[in-house]
Each structure stands twice: as C-alpha cells, then as structure tokens.
Amino acid sequence: MSVKKKAIKKTKQSVKTASPAVSIEHREKAEREKTVAMWAGVIFFMVIIFSFWTISFKNSIRGAVKEESSTGAEFDKVITDFNGILEKTKNNFTELQETMDSGSIAAKESTAKDSEIQALESRLNEVEEKMKLEKFLDQLNDKLSGDKKIEEKR
C-alpha cells in the first residue's frame, strides 16, 4: 500500500503543478467560447433587425409610389386645364386685336364693340387671375414635393 500511497501523492502533486496551466488554458477556452457566443448573438439579432427594417422599408416605398402616382394624375389635370385656359386667352386676345384694328366702324357697331371689348377685357382679367392662381398652385406643388423629398432623406 505504501507504493499506492506514493503513487497517489505523486499524481496529486503532478495534478497540482499541472493545474495552474490547465486552468489558464481552461480560462482562455472559456473566454473564447464566451466571445464566440457574444458575436453569434449580436449577428443573430442584427439579422433579425435588418430583416424587419427591410420589410418595413419596402412597404413604405410602395406607399410613397402610390401617393406619387395619384399626385401625378392631379398635376396632369392641372396642366391640361392651364393649357385650355391659355388657348382661350389667345383666342380672346386675337379677337380683341381684330376689333381694335378695324377703324371704320359705324356708331352702332362701335357701341356694340365697346360692350364686347369690355366683356372681353373682363374675361381676360379673369383668365389672367386664373393663370396667376395656376402658377401659384404649381409653385406650391413644387415646394411640397421638395419638402417630401427632404423628409424622405431624413
């Protein structure tokens, strides 16, 4: 038994002397495992966050495209109306010039033409006011579109 006791003492001593080296290696291994686990968790949650962000971004882009298409139709209508008013103004102006150019008009015709001229001038003033309103609305639309783009960039 004494041989066994000696062998046990030697193994205990060898374990005690090897124990600090094993514990350092064990600590390093545990630290590496902790670091790997930490990075795996960070990457996992970043993938989840990125996927949710991608889905919500895609949905917000679809909504913005739908809004732009509806405002584009309204803008086309405004342009069409503006072009129609401009054509009417040109026709009225041509009629006004023709009336002013004819110098040999009888007295009855001149009074009738004067009333027509006044009517045309009032219509011309109305059309000019509508044109000013259309220009203002166009500028306002451009500003609003610019503000939307700025907010989207934020």
Image (cartoon, rainbow, N blue to C red):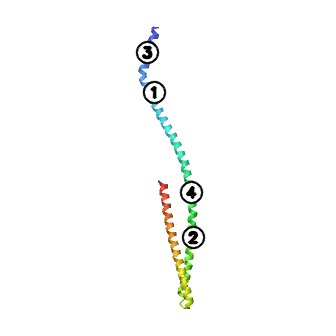
Nearer the camera: disc 2 or disc 4? 2
Marks 2,4: beta carbons within 8 A: no
Q: Report the amino acid beneath label 2.
A: Asp
Looking at the picture, does residue 85 appear above or below residue 17?
below
**Mark 3 or mark 2: whose residue is earlier in sequence:** 3
Mark 4, residue position: 65
Disc 1/disc 3 C-alpha distance (Å)? 23 Å
Q: Which residue is mark 1?
A: 26
Residue at 49% from the left image edge and 61% from the top image edge: 144
**Among the two numbered marks 2 and 4 on one chain, the one whose residue lies closer to the N terminus:** 4
**Pointer 1 or 2: first along the chain:** 1
Q: Residues within 10 Å of mark 4 (few under 14, many from 20)?
A: few
- Reading the image, the residue beneath label 3 is 10
Question: Which residue is found at the position 42% from the left and 19% from the top?
Answer: 16
Mark 1 against mark 4, which lies toward the viewer?
Answer: 4
Q: Earlier in the sequence, mark 1 or mark 3?
A: 3
Q: Which residue is mark 2?
A: 81
